[in-house]
Amino acid sequence: MEEAILSIVKPQSLSLVDTISAGYQALNRRPWALLIPVGVSTYLWLGNPLTLSKGGRIATGVNQALDLLTSNPQVRQEMAEQILQRDLRTALAWLNLVPVLEPLTPGNNSIHIGGPFTVFSVVALINLLALLWSCLFLALLSSAVRYEPLAPAPLLQRAVQVASTIILALLIVIGMSIIVGLPLLAISALIVIFVPATALPIALGWYIACFWAYVYISFTPEAILISRAGPLRALGHSIRVVRHNMLSSVSLLVISFLILNGLRLIWAQVAVNPLGIAAAILGSAYIGSGLSAARLEFYRDHVTRLHA
């Protein structure tokens, strides 16, 4: 009897290598999930970029802000051109969770938008579409991670539910940030005004605080998908998983960041002709999707151990 009790141990967590490998195995069980990142990347390369109009009120505001930052006309002009030529389809797609390969050079025949209402409407539409295709993409991957059979109608319904839950979780985070952050920001501003030498340490402190806040809530989408949790529970699950697995959580996030950003240099060398662009889009979609699935596997493995 004692031997049987002693033989019952908590399941061992997967190593990072095993987690990433499991992610790609899950992707291989749902290869058609690649259609979403491939399709989005293809649209970005073939479609007309959306840029800010150089004569609009927003462009005027950008130039006025740059006047306060630098007095060098050449630097100011270069910074203004970089901002105004940036493709809004990727720069403002804050809710996109799909790995995409952005065009390496600014496209021709840009569609210019200038009015604040127009820009706001375009940004809202971009993020709504980005969230929907992201949730469909992640729902496909999570069904593979959970070894669920593929059923199109429930999958679409699940994607919409996940999107609404992510929006609620985002609103909770924004609300808490305002409640906690505004008083601290006001105190920081007062300290900097009276003691200017503290500006750099305070800015560094805010950067570190924002970084760790991101780390702790970074697995919220995975909690919504794997644990079928609501917004508050999903945030709690993410914080708990990171708190109990700090080193491995940060390692996975950092490794994923380094892989994706490092490979951009390779894709830039590959995407020099139509065939190379196609290969770069496919390669980027596969590697990025595998890492997305690895995050789901990581969360599933560690939340299972916590509840064991």
Image (cartoon, rainbow, N blue to C red):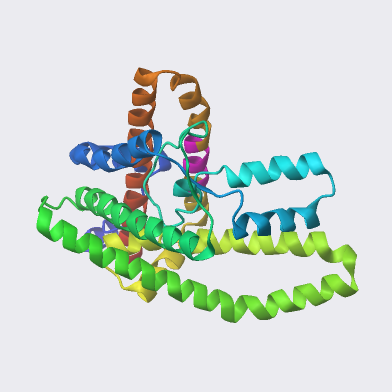
Q: Is residue 77 left or right of residue 1?
A: right
Quarter where residue 49 is shown: top left
Side of 172 where 164 appears, left or right: left
Residue 288 in the image: x percent, y percent?
A: 38, 39
| Image: 308 above or below 275 | below
Q: Quadrant of residue 59?
A: bottom right
Q: How many marks?
A: 0
Residue at (52% x, 58% y) in the render: 215
**Horizontal and vertical percent position of residue 83:** 61, 47
Q: Is residue 64 above or below residue 278?
A: below
One can see residue 268 in this view:
yes
Q: Quadrant of residue 235?
A: bottom left
Residue at 10% across / 58% down in the picture? 153
Q: Is residue 257 magenta?
A: yes
Of 261 and 118, the residue lying toward us: 118
> In the rendered view of the protein, which quadrant contains the N terminus?
bottom left
Q: Is residue 279 magenta?
A: no
Report whether residue 290 is seen. no
Report x, y in % for residue 306: 36, 64
Q: Quadrant of the C terminus?
A: bottom left
Q: Is residue 60 above or below residue 262?
A: below
The prevailing secondary structure element of the residues shown in magenta is: helix
Residue at the (24%, 49%) spot, across then down: 145
Which is nearer the eye, 34 or 16? 34
Q: Which is more toward the observer, 172 or 28?
A: 172
Q: Position of residue 58 (x, y in %)?
A: 60, 58
Residue at image x 60%, y 79%?
A: 180
Q: Nearer the viewer, residue 239 or 65?
A: 65
Region rendered in magenta: 253-260
